[in-house]
């Protein structure tokens, strides 16, 4: 058993014992606990950065972090609830903390009970033992990755400034409750990223080490795209609408902001989302019928991999929108109880397309555009109102597409309504083999900035 | 009476940290944090949840004599763990040297700031009643529901009381607190008659639960909430503005956004190699970069949401006139990069938590202009009609002249390297028309210097409570600031309002 696992295990056992004591009335002047649940992780991570061309400077030195903490949910015998954060001091200061938790206890007749453990939690690969060596302090590989990127990107003279980072982490999760749930498992993380001249960046981030060839591919992409973005272009906006291709990451941001942002159970139930509870009950068609949005926690070594939510709902795969129709909001136990829909399985959100098995590549998508823009990133996404679907964002880094060829860079604002875009029969998708979600081509208003 | 700081109890741990650094012949900076927080949410009259949190930990940054550096953090603040942390940080610093990592010896060149305790006297969480907070939050939530038909209202309130202790190998040992609190209201108007649902927020901020419980804050929040409710309902069916270049009138919250995004980040010395305010790594001091009437100041304000008296490296936080009468005067300088940028250290380093590395950044930034026009009506009660009339009377606007009033700040973003900034407003009024038609919000983007050169004037008194959070370097810290009630920006080809083509 690793030291990480031993320390975390001891802590979890001690916390469990103290909570059980509180269940049995171990503090006579406090009400007993009727139930409890915690979800904590013991994590160690190492990282190193290049900031403004400087490797390991004061703003990005070789760094090691460790932490032990997580969420705690209590039900008292008078049915009041408490939510708290537990940390390393929770054990030595338990009595004081228990009194603080009691002071913050509140009544909520819709709050969930402790959930008994499910018969099974899926096995999902999340642990790469090779990463342990890095986390224990052998950081040579992390330095070497950055040195390779430094030499490749800055050594040829066409890139002036580089920001980059590499990191590795290892953690053990402990999910336990008063009804017998006891799930603990390790996971790892590994990643690196490179951003050139603040124009374009790309990287790798998964729960396992990257294949060796991945670094070369990413550096080549960063270099070539950055060079393209340094060439000036011209674009005349069409007032009737313009074809715009959103790169995979940006397309994911739009879907996240406007579609999944309106699927949150609390927002739906409280009428703070674009979709109402009745819309879900009626399975209303809200996006095009070839598009589905699914939760999937079963993909091995992906950041979305999940054996369980923090409340003990197993990881798995389920649709929130299927063939354009609303199936269920994204629900925790409380809002599952309020809305009558099942609680959402653990995992990340993915866009899936009914394309008859024929996937158009992102390259093919760009080549099919006569006149348009390829947009890598926007400024201002976090300021948009997701309930309205409307967007007005600045895109200072986009490439003009002419007859399927990428030309120089222009700066524009994009304006429109994503609900209209995602329903528009003209909207098309293209897949990058290294990305999990597709790029998206849509029609919107464009204002060219000088 | 100043509060007792919880970080005082870590004397043994910080002594062990400094002693071990001495034994290993490295310079150490230790950053101890002991935070308590409380937050609650009410949704359409019902208490949604209460959360409490404690966070204790220490970050240790060490420097070898040559200036190689390493950083470690842990949530254990004991003598034993602190000794281990120093050893690990020293090992990391030395391991990096084989790869040619950057050196910095600035820490060896400063004098000790001695032992100090700078504690505020704002209410602690132990002195704040949960019941009063919950009851008041539910009351204001209920009241807001009545400000429109079919409004959905979400209210949230948070109080955070972080205590800090910064120790250095030169004997500096400073303890201080940075309490901050806010109340927010999110009002969603349902879609009607083919329109789209719209959400508008209102908030007040300060240092403790008084932001919720004190009558002065309650009245201010109520006025802001009423305004937000009205806007949310009107925005449901509001059309989109035609994109382009306009004369603009922005309120003080947007002006804070302009100062923060468009200028403040560019004046932070860690980015001077690439900033538009830098030349060959030095700040362009003495150059005129804005209209002569414009001054931009940053510095801590006691009781403010972003108050911080001491930097994360244990330096006193200075109030700095970055720009005076349009001329660049000073930067936001941290210990490690101020000298290289050619400006004094202003104690600008901030961190989100003990786990993070310090970066120079703003606290409370404000734009002021010379001879602002008088506007005595309380900011929250200024109507678009009164604003238009005042602009006409003071020569800032001519009848029929294309001009827009951008109301409310929803956040922004900047690229200090090329000076591109964006921020978004809550709503837009067309000032060229006496009936002041309302439009959907649209992104306001442009070039930093173009915007600052185009400032024509200000109206009304200074307000400093426009709150937000700054996400530089992936660390979220409270930010705030302001300006006169309104600031006027001339039409400029490099400042664009997004919208219909």
Image: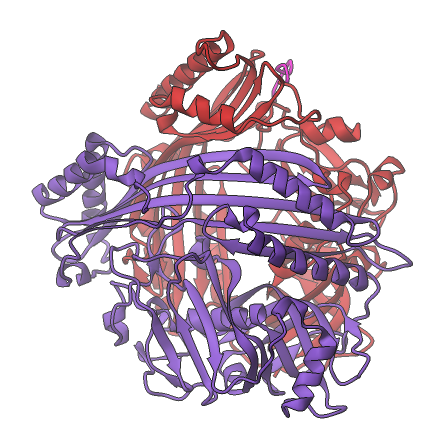
Chain colours: A red, B purple
Figure quadrant of the N terminus of chain A = top left
The answer to which quarter of the image holds residue A440 is bottom right
Task: Judge whether A77 appears above or below A201 on screen.
Answer: above
Task: Judge whether B478 appears above or below A43 on screen.
Answer: below
Tell me, yes or no, if residue A276 can be seen here: yes
Give whichever of B192, B50 is nearer the camera.
B50
Residue B234 within the segment the image draws in magenta: no
Dominant SS type (magenta): loop
Q: Which residue lies furthest to the top in this view?
A: A24
Give whichever of B292, B414 is nearer the camera.
B292
Tell me, yes or no, if residue A303 can be seen here: no
Residue range corresponding to the magenta coloring? A115-121
The spot of residue A53 in percent (x, y) is: 34, 65
Q: How many marks?
A: 0
Side (left or right) of A198 relative to A404: left
Task: Judge whether B247 appears above or below A203 on screen.
Answer: below
User: Who's the residue at 66% across and 40% down the image?
Assistant: B138
Figure quadrant of the C terminus of chain A = bottom right
User: Who's the residue at 10% across and 43% down the image?
Assistant: B24
User: Who's the residue at 44% across and 32% down the image?
Assistant: A128
The answer to which quarter of the image holds residue B75 is top left
The spot of residue B26 in percent (x, y) is: 13, 49
The spot of residue B467 in percent (x, y) is: 52, 59
The spot of residue B16 in percent (x, y) is: 15, 37
Side (left or right) of A426 relative to B94: right
User: Who's the residue at 58% across and 26% down the image?
Assistant: A307
């Amino acid at each position: 058993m690793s030291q990480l696992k031993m320390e975390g295990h001891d802590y979890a056992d001690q916390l469990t014992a103290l909570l059980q004591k509180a269940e049995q009335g171990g503090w006579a002047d406090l009400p007993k606990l009727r139930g409890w649940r915690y979800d904590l992780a013991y994590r160690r991570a190492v990282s190193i950065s290049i900031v403004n061309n400087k490797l390991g400077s004061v703003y990005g030195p070789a760094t090691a972090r460790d932490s032990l903490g997580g969420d705690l949910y209590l039900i008292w015998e008078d049915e009041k609830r408490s939510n708290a954060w537990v940390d390393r001091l929770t054990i030595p200061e338990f009595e004081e903390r228990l009194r603080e938790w009691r002071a913050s206890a509140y009544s909520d007749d819709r709050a969930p009970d402790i959930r008994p453990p499910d018969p099974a939690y899926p096995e999902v690969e999340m642990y790469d033992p090779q990463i342990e060596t890095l986390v224990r302090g052998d950081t040579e590989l992390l330095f070497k990755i950055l040195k390779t990127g430094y030499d490749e990107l800055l050594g040829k003279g066409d890139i002036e400034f580089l920001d980059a980072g590499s990191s590795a982490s290892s953690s053990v999760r402990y999910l336990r409750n008063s009804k017998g749930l006891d799930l603990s498992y390790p996971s790892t993380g590994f990643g690196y990223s490179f951003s050139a001249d603040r124009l374009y960046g790309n990287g790798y981030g998964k729960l396992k080490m990257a294949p060796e060839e991945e670094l070369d591919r990413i550096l080549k992409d960063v270099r070539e795209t950055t060079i393209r973005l340094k060439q000036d272009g011209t674009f005349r906006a069409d007032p009737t609408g313009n074809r715009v291709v959103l790169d995979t990451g940006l397309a994911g941001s739009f879907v996240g902001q406007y579609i999944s942002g309106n699927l949150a159970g609390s927002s739906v139930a409280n009428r703070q989302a674009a979709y109402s509870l009745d819309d879900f009950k009626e399975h209303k068609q809200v996006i095009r019928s070839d598009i589905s949005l699914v939760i999937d926690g079963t993909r091995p070594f992906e950041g979305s991999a999940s054996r369980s939510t923090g409340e003990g709902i197993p990881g798995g795969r389920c649709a929130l929108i299927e063939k354009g129709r609303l199936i269920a909001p994204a629900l925790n136990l409380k809002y599952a109880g309020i809305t009558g829909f099942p609680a959402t399985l653990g995992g990340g959100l993915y866009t899936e397309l009914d394309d008859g098995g024929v996937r158009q590549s992102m390259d093919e998508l760009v080549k099919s555009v006569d006149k348009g823009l390829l947009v890598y990133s926007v400024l201002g996404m976090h300021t948009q109102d997701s309930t309205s679907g409307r967007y007005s964002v600045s895109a200072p880094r986009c490439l003009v597409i002419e007859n399927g060829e990428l030309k120089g860079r222009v700066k524009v604002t994009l304006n429109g309504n994503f609900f209209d875009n995602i329903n528009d029969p003209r909207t098309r998708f293209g897949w990058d083999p290294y990305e999990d979600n597709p790029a998206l081509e849509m029609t919107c208003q464009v204002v060219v900035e000088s | 009476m100043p509060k007792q700081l919880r970080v005082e109890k870590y004397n043994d741990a910080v002594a062990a940290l400094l002693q071990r650094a001495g034994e290993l012949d490295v310079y150490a900076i230790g950053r101890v944090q002991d935070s308590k927080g409380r937050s609650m949410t009410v949704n359409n009259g019902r208490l949604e949840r209460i959360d409490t949190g404690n966070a204790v930990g220490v970050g240790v940054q060490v420097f070898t004599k040559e200036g190689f550096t390493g950083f470690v953090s842990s949530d254990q603040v004991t003598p034993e763990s602190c000794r281990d942390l120093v050893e690990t940080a020293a090992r990391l610093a030395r391991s990096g040297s084989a790869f040619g990592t950057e050196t910095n010896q600035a820490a060896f060149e400063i004098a000790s700031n001695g032992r100090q305790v700078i504690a505020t006297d704002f209410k602690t969480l132990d002195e704040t009643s949960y019941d009063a907070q919950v009851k008041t939050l539910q009351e204001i939530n209920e009241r807001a529901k009545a400000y429109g038909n079919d409004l959905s209202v979400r209210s949230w309130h948070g109080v955070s009381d972080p205590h800090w202790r910064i120790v250095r190998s030169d004997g500096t040992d400073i303890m201080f607190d940075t309490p901050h609190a806010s109340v927010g209201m999110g009002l969603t108007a349902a879609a009607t008659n083919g329109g789209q649902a719209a959400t508008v927020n209102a908030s007040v901020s300060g240092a403790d639960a008084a932001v919720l419980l004190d009558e002065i804050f309650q009245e201010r929040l109520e006025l802001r909430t009423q305004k937000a409710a009205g806007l949310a309902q009107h925005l449901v069916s509001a059309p989109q503005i035609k994109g382009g270049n306009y004369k603009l009138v922005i309120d003080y919250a947007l002006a804070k956004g302009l100062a923060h995004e468009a200028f403040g980040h560019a004046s932070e010395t860690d980015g001077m190699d690439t900033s538009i305010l830098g030349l060959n790594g030095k700040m362009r001091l003495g150059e005129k970069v804005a209209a002569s009437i414009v001054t931009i100041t940053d510095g801590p304000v006691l009781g403010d949401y972003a108050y911080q008296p001491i930097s994360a490296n244990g330096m006193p936080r200075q109030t700095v006139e970055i720009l005076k009468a349009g001329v660049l005067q000073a930067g936001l300088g941290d210990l490690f990069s101020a000298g290289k940028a050619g400006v004094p250290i202003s104690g600008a380093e901030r961190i989100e938590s003990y786990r993070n590395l310090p970066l120079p950044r703003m606290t409370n930034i404000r734009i002021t202009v010379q001879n602002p026009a008088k506007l005595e009506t309380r900011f929250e009660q200024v109507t678009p009609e009164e604003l238009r009339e005042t602009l006409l009377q003071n020569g800032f606007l001519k009848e029929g002249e294309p001009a827009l009033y951008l109301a409310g700040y929803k956040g922004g973003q900047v690229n200090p390297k090329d000076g591109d900034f964006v921020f978004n407003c809550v709503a837009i009024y067309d000032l060229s028309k006496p009936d002041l038609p309302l439009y959907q919000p649209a992104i306001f983007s442009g070039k930093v210097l173009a915007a600052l050169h185009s400032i024509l004037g200000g109206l009304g008194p200074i307000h400093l409570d426009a709150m937000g959070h700054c996400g530089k370097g992936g660390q979220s810290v409270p930010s705030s600031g302001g300006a006169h009630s309104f600031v006027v920006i001339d039409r400029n080809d490099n400042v664009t309002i997004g919208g219909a083509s």
